[in-house]
Image (cartoon, rainbow, N blue to C red):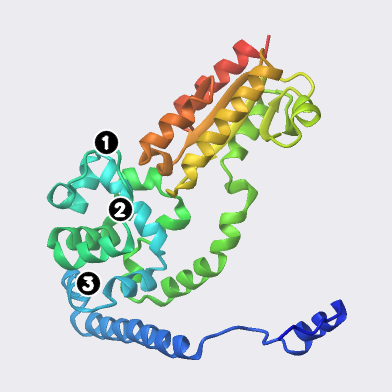
Amino acid sequence: MKLMVKTVQDKINTVIEKNTFYFFNKHFEETYEGNINSIKESLLFLKNEIDTKGLNKDIFYKLLSEKPNGLKSLLALTGFSNESLKRLITLIRVVDDDQLNNLSLNKKWNKSKKSGELAEWSDAIIEKMILSNEYFRQGIINIFFEGATIPFLIDTIPLFELKKLSISKLKFDLPSMIDTLVRYKEKGSYSGQTENNPETVISDLLQEMNVAFEKGDLSELIKRESTTKRTMDFIIPDKRNPIILIECSFLVTTSSGQGDKSKTEISVKKLIERYYPKATFIGFVDGIGWYVRKQDLSRMVKAYDDVFTFHSDELLRFKNLLKTKYIK
């Protein structure tokens, strides 16, 4: 049977008049509501235990080992996201810090080879480790109780996240619960702030040194390579006569896209060599996302004439490079 031809207005009317506004699967909603209730009941049980027995690690050890949604309940209580927990576990696995190792019981459950390629653990692996490995379970509890006192974590984790590792949250302290609500509400806004972008560090440094720069597409690439032109994060001093070109790649997550990004940068490098042979191509490559993807990192750094991180030593080295290459 041939479909009746409809006008554009007919199609618009269908979308407007028969709009469901929000899609939802009733069966899924009912099933997921059971999951929400399970976490809520676990938290109510936890609060009752703390009210009657006082705050202690054994209560949380029991929560993680006996309650199906124990870990989710702990994360809900503190406002610590699942993704943040993944990053933290990866950090513990790759960093050799004595205090952090002792608190997390790292040596008793971590079988990672720090020198080799290391994949981030999935939700399934973390949940399995929580249930099957008592040392990992105890280490996670220790982190939530005392992680905010470890100097390495204080220096490494953003304050916005570090504040979630507060013992007052584990007590169901009302101001801390309000703090959790506010941080949850402001998470998206916090992440999207320009000042929270690593590129701001470079921008501030260049302005401090009175180094002229622009951002955008290089002039020759626009004219000659319009289909492959690429926006540069920083062009010193300007698009017409670039002396230094800078690209930033700060990754706190791991993904298959890192391989594609490295291929893109290598192709950009070839264009720069063709049209701007005197320009120096620099990469700021940093973040735990690159730390644990060594093969992608190896390909990535081949694209640049030099690579820097946002470590204070590296920023000083970058300043010295500017003085050598640009500031006469």
Residue 65, given in percent of the width and then of the height, sits at 18, 73
Q: Is residue 69 left or right of residue 285?
A: left
Seen in the picture, residue 61 relative to 129 is either above or below; the reply is below
* Amino acid type of the residue that numbered disc 2 sits on in the rendered structure: Ile
| Of labels 1 and 2, the one closer to you | 1
Closer to the camera in the image, 230 or 144: 230
Closer to the camera in the image, 124 or 318: 124
Identify the element where label 3 is drawn. helix
Q: Are marks 2 and 3 in contact (CB under 8 Å)?
A: no
Q: Earlier in the sequence, mark 2 or mark 3?
A: 3
Identify the element where label 2 is drawn. helix
State the residue at coordinates (67%, 31%): 234
Seen in the picture, residue 24 relative to 308 is either above or below; the reply is below
- Which residue in the structure is indicated by mark 3? 64
| Of labels 3 and 1, the one closer to you | 1
Residue 98, given in percent of the width and then of the height, sits at 21, 41
Query: Dot 1: few (<14), some (14–19), or many (≥20) neighbours within 10 Å?
Result: few
- Which residue in the structure is indicated by mark 1? 116
Q: Is residue 38 left or right of residue 99?
A: right
Residue 206, given in percent of the width and then of the height, sits at 66, 27
Residue at the outermost top position: 328
Q: Are marks 1 and 2 in contact (CB under 8 Å)?
A: no
State the residue at coordinates (40%, 43%): 288
* Amino acid type of the residue that numbered disc 1 sits on in the rendered structure: Gly
Q: Earlier in the sequence, mark 1 or mark 2?
A: 2
Closer to the camera in the image, 166 or 197: 197
